[in-house]
Amino acid sequence: MTLKVAETQQIDYATQALTDLFHTSPEEFLYLLKRDGTKFLRFYWNEVGKKLNLKELIPPFGLNFDIRKPRPNLSVALITLPRPRVEGEAFYVGLIYRPTRRHMFFGVSDTTKVIGLEHWLDETGEERTAMAEYTRNLQRHTIKTGVEPSLEVFYSSLLEQLTE
């Protein structure tokens, strides 16, 4: 599914900054998130904002996180983002780290996975959602639609996407 997405601070933050930081060094990312929490998240929010015009900046109101460990060797950082304003912005981003998973396909390890729950509108203008994976090479792939924009429902849907 290819969708046209506007570039906004929220989209760049979720699909570029967080995704690149996490895929590149997941252990360090989780360490800093545990240690500095929203201060760490807000720092990168502001860094992304430096690349935009002043009128495009939005405050990080609502930016928050929760780290869960649903089973041994699986950590999930749930990032709550400011409420989406335009299509393609995410409600939540799940950062999944499986340090012992080594599924080598053409030499690529899949120890990390980043999935966002995005806001979209249907043909009638009604809100709908799409879960999309943000890959290591910063590509976006839709994996599921119609997930309720609730943190707990997103978390459950996220866990369903994981294979052992």
Image (spheres, helix red, strand yellow):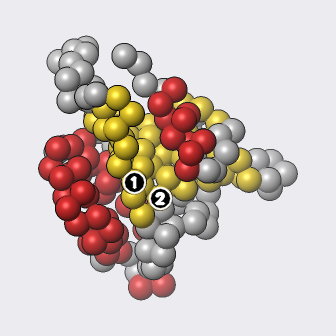
Give coordinates of residue 73: x percent, y percent. 25, 28
Q: What numbered label is drawn on residue 29?
A: none
Give coordinates of residue 111: x percent, y percent. 25, 29
Q: Label 2 amino acid?
A: Thr
Give coordinates of residue 125: x percent, y percent. 80, 55
**Residue drawn at (25%, 47%), measured in percent from left and top?**
22
Observer-nearest of 16 and 90 = 90
- The reply to whether discs 2 and 1 touch (Cβ–Cβ < 8 Å) is yes
Which of marks 1 and 2 precedes in the sequence?
A: 1
Observer-nearest of 107 and 53 = 107
Q: Secondary structure at mark 1?
A: strand
Residue at the extreme right = 124
Q: Is residue 102 above or below residue 20?
A: above
Observer-nearest of 16 and 23 = 23
Q: Is residue 137 above or below residue 57?
A: above
**Residue drawn at (42%, 44%), measured in percent from left and top?**
94
Depth check, mark 2 against mark 1: the one in front is 1
Q: What numbered label is drawn on residue 66?
A: 1
Q: CA distance from mark 2 to mark 1?
A: 8 Å
Q: Secondary structure at mark 2?
A: strand
Give coordinates of residue 32: x percent, y percent. 19, 58
Q: Label 1 amino acid?
A: Asp
Observer-nearest of 138 and 18 = 18
**Residue drawn at (55%, 56%), measured in percent from left and top?**
91
Name the side, left or right, on which 16 lies relative to 6: left
Q: Is residue 52 visible?
A: yes
| Crowdedness near tag 1: few (<14), some (14–19) or many (≥20) residues, C-alpha within 10 Å | few
**Residue pointed to by mark 2:** 80
**Residue drawn at (44%, 67%), measured in percent from left and top?**
63
